Image (spheres, coloured by chain):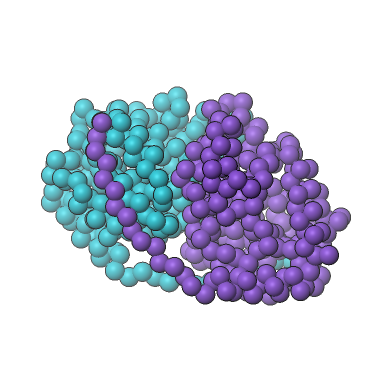
Chain colours: A cyan, B purple
Amino acid sequence: MGEIRLIEIKEEILSDNKKDADTLRKKLKDQKTFLLNLMSSPGAGKTTLILKTIEHLKNRFRIGVLEADIDSMVDAEKVADAGIPAVQIRTGGFCHLDAAMVMKGLDAFDLSSLDLVIIENVGNLVCPAEFDTGAVKNAMILSVPEGDDKPLKYPLMFSICDVLLVNKIDYLSISDFDMKALHERVRTLNPGMRIIETSGKTGAGIDAWAQWLAEETHTFIT
Amino acid sequence: MGEIRLIEIKEEILSDNKKDADTLRKKLKDQKTFLLNLMSSPGAGKTTLILKTIEHLKNRFRIGVLEADIDSMVDAEKVADAGIPAVQIRTGGFCHLDAAMVMKGLDAFDLSSLDLVIIENVGNLVCPAEFDTGAVKNAMILSVPEGDDKPLKYPLMFSICDVLLVNKIDYLSISDFDMKALHERVRTLNPGMRIIETSGKTGAGIDAWAQWLAEETHTFIT
């Protein structure tokens, strides 16, 4: 066996973000708008899942979507095509959204006309986990092809989210993904995390997810 | 169709990194060590691909691996199990490696005893693309399940890499991934990019990739 050496690099802490996030959550409560922050790796299926969620909930809630993207507007265009107001934040190289960016994005909506805003964060399992956006709840997607070991590699993301959507379960048939091992790794990091298996392609599990989101939204805005 | 609003957030530029990277490349040339920077999303198959690459090239070159991970050492342990010296940089929340971090990592090797060092960068398509690590060549992996639209979403990564490995082609049979569309999107961003289709699982394409890496290494160190 070869040798391993370990070098630690300390993280700088950005200080005012938490305060901004708490201020935003209070404002959202006053305005009766639920804000969900959805995070994942690139290509895990965020946009497709948001479109399916809109289909399920658009007759029950007034929904908006805040899209974060480094350089394109393709996701915002898909949401707008579904008839839903979309705000695109082009982050110009920024790898995450913070609470100040989200506040700026929300200012472009008429919040009093919305019950639920979904943030599609930058596709990244690292940086978005470090910045409280001011959302009421955090959700993440892990897609089956990414592998069951991701809680070991990106523990903060799995720790700060309320819900984990294990997406692209239609790939399970040709994958060595171990769902039991995933559950155990998640439980170690975040015992209270809700885990829902989904497929944006087949629609499996979207009912359960939409029901969770509807209940959380209803509780917050009433 | 709903409305879309666009908000731009300007990026801060970190200035000294490019200078550090150029200094490192000069040092590597003097020491006759080739440095490859391998980047991808989480779960695209970097570690498996590195292990396969080691199998192909370990009798020809003296290889080391520089592992960047936020919080775990699991990848470095796999490399060390393959009998290859590994240096683990635990980034403590940092979302990328810069040239200074890589220099610090390389100091933990005896570079004069190595022909080829492979950096496994943090799993992230955003931040690592913004920081020149001092590597001689940049390679990236896009896995089939991530989708063929990723050049539209993460254009910088596709622009700065010399090689694209389209990995997990064993998933093509149940995916709607459009290889032709991917090639066209890549060509628009980076006409000179070499594209190699691979599967870490079946070993497909690893020969072509290892041959490219062997040629680049040989040219640089002789």
Residue A11 in the image: state x and y as whole percent. 46, 70
Residue at horizontal 45 percent and vertical 30 percent from the top: A199
Q: Nearer the viewer, residue A194 or B142?
A: B142
Residue at horizontal 24 percent and vertical 55 percent from the top: A104
Quadrant of the rendering where the C terminus of chain B is positioned: bottom right
Left or right: A183, with B139 as reference point: left
Left or right: B84, with A179 as reference point: right
Work out whether A116 lies above or below B127. Answer: above
Residue at horizontal 29 percent and vertical 64 percent from the top: A18
Residue B26 in the image: state x and y as whole percent. 69, 73
Work out whether A57 lies above or below A181. Answer: above
Which residue, as the protein is rendered here, is positioned at the far right? B59
Q: Nearer the viewer, residue B37 or A187?
A: B37
Q: In the rendered image, is residue B31 in sight? A: yes
Left or right: A154, with B21 as reference point: left
Residue B193 in the image: state x and y as whole percent. 63, 47
Quadrant assignment, res A156: bottom left
Work out whether A71 lies above or below A2. Answer: above
Q: In the rendered image, is residue A172 in sight? A: no
Left or right: A45, with B88 as reference point: left
Residue A41 in the image: state x and y as whole percent. 48, 46
Quadrant assignment, res B18: bottom right
Q: Nearer the viewer, residue B146 or B78?
A: B146
Residue at horizontal 15 percent and vertical 45 percent from the top: A110
Quadrant of the rendering where the N terminus of chain B is positioned: top left
